[in-house]
Amino acid sequence: MTDVKGFFYPRTASGRSSLIPSPPWFYSGDLLTVEYRTDPARVAELLPAPLAPAEEDPGAVALIWADWQSCSSSRQELLDPVRSQYKEAFVVVRCSYQGRTYSRCVYIWVDKDFAIGRGVHQGYPKKLGSMWQTRPHPFAQAAPQIQAGGVFGATLAANDRRLAEAVLTLREKSESNGFVNGHPMAHHRVFPGIASGAPDAYAELISSGASEFEGGQAWKGDVDLRLFPSPTEELDRLRVDEVIGGYYRQVGVVWNGGASLETLSS
Amino acid sequence: MTDVKGFFYPRTASGRSSLIPSPPWFYSGDLLTVEYRTDPARVAELLPAPLAPAEEDPGAVALIWADWQSCSSSRQELLDPVRSQYKEAFVVVRCSYQGRTYSRCVYIWVDKDFAIGRGVHQGYPKKLGSMWQTRPHPFAQAAPQIQAGGVFGATLAANDRRLAEAVLTLREKSESNGFVNGHPMAHHRVFPGIASGAPDAYAELISSGASEFEGGQAWKGDVDLRLFPSPTEELDRLRVDEVIGGYYRQVGVVWNGGASLETLSS
Amino acid sequence: MTDVKGFFYPRTASGRSSLIPSPPWFYSGDLLTVEYRTDPARVAELLPAPLAPAEEDPGAVALIWADWQSCSSSRQELLDPVRSQYKEAFVVVRCSYQGRTYSRCVYIWVDKDFAIGRGVHQGYPKKLGSMWQTRPHPFAQAAPQIQAGGVFGATLAANDRRLAEAVLTLREKSESNGFVNGHPMAHHRVFPGIASGAPDAYAELISSGASEFEGGQAWKGDVDLRLFPSPTEELDRLRVDEVIGGYYRQVGVVWNGGASLETLSS
Amino acid sequence: MTDVKGFFYPRTASGRSSLIPSPPWFYSGDLLTVEYRTDPARVAELLPAPLAPAEEDPGAVALIWADWQSCSSSRQELLDPVRSQYKEAFVVVRCSYQGRTYSRCVYIWVDKDFAIGRGVHQGYPKKLGSMWQTRPHPFAQAAPQIQAGGVFGATLAANDRRLAEAVLTLREKSESNGFVNGHPMAHHRVFPGIASGAPDAYAELISSGASEFEGGQAWKGDVDLRLFPSPTEELDRLRVDEVIGGYYRQVGVVWNGGASLETLSS
């Protein structure tokens, strides 16, 4: 009897072809976060049962750009960085489950297939996009510094359409990098039934978060944010009613699995 | 209680953001197929239980390039063709399940996210790649014709490495487009357990195939095929021992779901 | 004394590295053309001396999408189609020079470097863009036919912003594929002076056109065209005042050099 | 008489569409340099008249990866970083002209069109490629530090083929970042004649270099370098006979034009 190996597909005799290796997964990167308030009803409509809106500030949204380098325990990806570097932009809201507050990624775009594969596993609803964020650099000829006055731009596009643009001007040190993405994530993993018109074959509510986290000094500042419409996206439905703030922080993260909260159907 | 909609993720109040719409899915495209024999043990090691090697010609492999235009029932994707056109290359072998012969895609690369999403649903183990195949055109200044003497090239790369190259020279009309990809597909759909080191949370063996199919005149010819190594791929492990033939055919296909063969764990 | 070879850069002992081989260059492809009228002053402002506006219909503009396969005399590119296939969208106006009417490409976007290199040689002001146009296919599951009722979409983006979208619905056979792009091209080739603030080091007005041309039956139809703003583009400055028509045609073309009209400075 | 504006093509009434703005151009970035010796005859064959081989160490080659953020004086590109960030890999040799030693870029690949446009102006023979280099980051979860033991990978591909791979392990601080790329650049700018078979219409030998330069502490280390063949490239013809060393340095640069050395034909 054949015993195929590999954390993810495609599984083979060696397991070497798997789109993603087994966790833990390691990340070093820069986060540009914009937090704002939208109509709480627009957040609530993205929270399927058994999730409910967060009790406090239920209209709070975080739109986060991340510029990552990542690897598995072997660290081999770092020597072939096409397999290590990726960019993403994602939208996080908060919700309540069994009396506890969770964060939840409702939209996310990445630019590599291994990042999509991780998302399928972790319940992040990843699509491909084109994300860009200004990088800090020790030499200021063409780069901001992470300090008061530093200006960072960030853009998101998918299917050749701009979806979001932000400009963040750092003003002062901050105790936090925002609060919307600060809880464990509550995500769904779903397989639609394979038969035409069938209900989901499998649905599971899972929770996960960083198993290790290090962060540099966070900075906050003033932010200009614009969202644009697209026939295939609903990001602009989370319209910007009030900007809470913008943040910049460099971080190191380890992810090593999560917990199943409940199996919703099978 | 919120009722989110959408065939696939992300699910929203309208369902409009879903990476892929509900089937049926419609395809028009050109297939360049190369069939060859490899060591049957190399095929067998890719067939997890409850699958077994095909009884006849168990080392037969098809490497297929496809240049697709596709859409859902709305046909809206055809007016915004960044959402409609994609290319793929995939490797098919045959297997046996409960006494019946199935085809099975063991490796596949595509160049759009909606194609990856369809693959997650259908059990195709899709990664991103860069695929190119020569196109026929009515004017021969820079194009072959689908006729004797027509020469078509095809290449596959992933992570900036060439994985395969083929050159097909058409020789004569053919009754078929090959035999390896001619059965219903038997594919696994798997969610690894979310907890570190956990077994699969869900695994299902499904079957599917075209619900409608039209094909033009198939042509066969002589083929030169080369496979190259990569640290993250095992395509070249299916080494070319004997070329069976090369084929070219234009087709129209509808896919509208499949059947669950068995749930393997949950 | 070393004798480096190669039609274009980089020149080497063998000439094999040249971004583009020597003409003639061969093309097979599909053209989707939209012609419209804009304010003639907006066309005139794009015509540097010694060019003048066309005498008739000086506000006529053609926006053309092309889906090409191309090669040099060796035809080797056709076997490695990443080096052969490319897409483009370009804007053509007409002008007058020494009493003769010329066409002139004022904006153009392509998606391959060899196409940029050809443009530097031919005076096409090429940038990178992302262009998509619906393809006809013999099987209609997900494709229009080149016949009455066929609907074709076309989009153009650059720097992650949509610049143009068109939808063309074919209505009837047409004697032409439009008139704006029907003359020899009059293009500038310029090297800015290398010293800071220096005038052009070289400027030449050249003319060229196809040395051979074959075309299938042209079709015309109704067209919906939208242009969008961008901080780095001025396509939308050529605003659509009146649509003249939309056209679809498959063509085969050979380009084999042109003529120098005058050297403007050196 | 119309007066079109713009440093480069396309020139318009406002100049806003120019693929590249006027110098000065500003750069912040990271350089990974590998220096080695090849057969001096292979370098000499890339040096057209009036250039001659360098008197000392004429077979020295530098292969340099650069991860850049760049902008013009307006700094607007930094707020829309798709127009600011790019990567490149380039090959530099040395040569002699009128008794002075120059550096000369013989091959270069970039990943943005504005970088190609700058190259046409500056005489860098730019093609499109896919370049990746490991990034340092303050948090080491998935990143090296710029210090002893830091390991950096770098890869180069074009047309879906790997052309070069390097791994650099930093060992100690270095007084320099190598010597091959340390002179003013001597580059050709050429327009082939537009008529079929015509000689060059224009050829100029120019010189340029940074007008301002700042650099961080350079590090040197051990390097593993592999070059691969391609039908369209000759990088591997500069075969690695002896590795001189590998270097890593963060820099800030301003480029503001150069000087014409001589016009070779017109």
Image: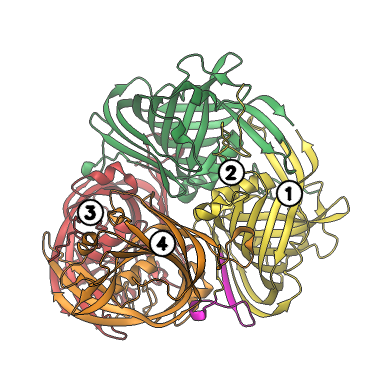
Chain colours: A orange, B red, C green, D yellow
Residue beneath disc 3: B16
Q: Residue at x 18, y 48 (%)?
A: B73
Label 4 – label 3 distance at C-alpha: 21 Å
Q: Quadrant of the C terminus of chain A?
A: bottom left
Of tags 2 and 1, the one toward the viewer is 1
At label 1, counting other C-alpha atoms closer than 10 Å, the crowd grade (few under 14, some 14-19, many 20 or more) is many
**What element does badge 4 sit on?**
loop
Return the x and y of residue B194 as percentages of the image width and height: 28, 80
Q: Are marks 2 and 1 on the same chain?
A: no
**What element does badge 3 sit on?**
loop
Nearer the observer, A24 or B66: A24
Q: Are marks 3 and 1 on the same chain?
A: no
- Is residue A231 in the magenta section? no
Q: Amino acid at mark 2?
A: Ile
Q: Which mark is residue D187?
A: 1
From which residue to which does the magenta span run?
D138-155
Nearer the observer, C82 or B47: C82
Of tags 4 and 2, the one toward the viewer is 4
Residue beneath disc 4: A111
Q: Residue at x 27, y 78 (%)?
A: A207
Q: Amino acid at mark 3?
A: Arg
Q: Is residue B174 visible?
A: no
Label 1 – label 4 distance at C-alpha: 36 Å
Q: Amino acid at mark 1?
A: His
